[in-house]
Image (cartoon, rainbow, N blue to C red):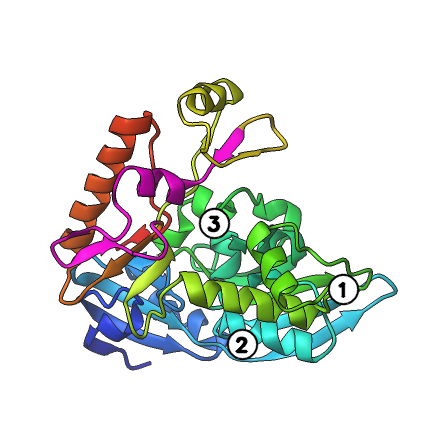
Amino acid sequence: MKLASAVDLTPFNTLALPGKAARYLKISDPAQLTDPALKDEQRFILGGGSNLVLTGDFAGLLLHMAIPGKRLLQEDDEAWYIEAGAGENWHDFVQWTLAQGWPGLENLSLIPGTVGAAPIQNIGAYGLEVGECFHSLSAWDFEKQAFTTVDRQACRFAYRDSLFKQQGWHLSGRMAIVSVVFRLAKAWQPNIRYTDVAQELAAREIAAPTPQEIANAIIAVRQRKLPDPAQIPNTGSFFHNPVVSAAEAERLAADFPNLPRYPQPDGRVKLAAGWLIEQAGWKGKNLGPVGMYEKQALVLVNRGGANGDDVKRTMAAVQAEVRARFAVALTPEPMFL
């Protein structure tokens, strides 16, 4: 198996940050992963590069997951079970499921990245997380030198979290996800409780939306609020929405009555990071070539020519301003390499 060397990674991360991989291998077939020569390499598993801050050159082996394929694996009276290769583009996959008449993923339309990366981050938007529609995945375990299946319970999904992040496998490269199976319930119910989505549907005079109409509305909302990485390099939402105790939320609400707050099942309260950043004065503000997007303060953008140090400097400045004003800590969503 021949590995490419000194490969430029700028095209492989949506922030368009510079860096090179000492060794690079595009994975289009799971069998490639079974080569014993890969076992002892320092590895990083790359999907679409939409959740990555490249801080410079990578001295190890970068495995670029590009395994294709999507199919109806099986169905029963309650659900369809859809399997997709790790390299499938996430948005294209969502649109394909809708075209086949299998609803359930429409609220996750236009999220960048690949199918294989979706469960690692437990991607979510507009009232839905991928873990809610997840059934299982298949992965190559480099330590055990065997393929393994991980089901929904074992994935330990949480807000933007999963077993893969909890174990650090997203950084160590121990596991390479090769395919994912989704369970899409036949008893479909529209999920339009988010105000932006409801308002968009109302503007279109759609009272009883179909899954595709919900997807179209969400695509329109996202396109208005979020920059296209091909035009303005970014990683989407850069910070987690912080989750605080009920008491802390009450303290903040007393001082900032307009602060958006979302009660969680465990009694804690999720805050809107974008609102905090905007109130701290960072919406549309730049620090050198990196700044927070003028239409959505939660999105960090590369205005041109930035590197990983520029991103870290801006991130730290935003965190410091929010901490000083609200005594709330912001945690970045992307992983750093």
Amino acid at pointer 2? Asp
Specify the label residue 280 is tagged with: none
Specify the label residue 208 is tagged with: 1
Which residue lies most toward the right here?
Answer: 77
Residue appearing at x 49%, y 20% in the figure:
250
Tag 2 and tag 1, C-beta contact below 8 Å: no
Q: Crowding at label 3, few (<14), some or many (≥20) Cα neighbours within 10 Å?
A: many
Residue 278 in the image: above or below residue 217: above
Residue appearing at x 69%, y 63% in the figure:
104
Residue 277 in the image: above or below residue 189: above
For residue 178, say whether it is visible.
Answer: no
Tag 1 and tag 3, C-beta contact below 8 Å: no
Residue 100 in the image: above or below residue 155: below
Residue where numbered disc 2 is placed: 92
Amino acid at pointer 1? Ala
Numbered disc 1: secondary structure: loop
Which stretch did the figure color magenta? 269-297
Q: Crowding at label 1, few (<14), some or many (≥20) Cα neighbours within 10 Å?
A: few
Label whose residue precedes the other's in the sequence (3 or 2): 2
Label whose residue precedes the other's in the sequence (2 or 1): 2
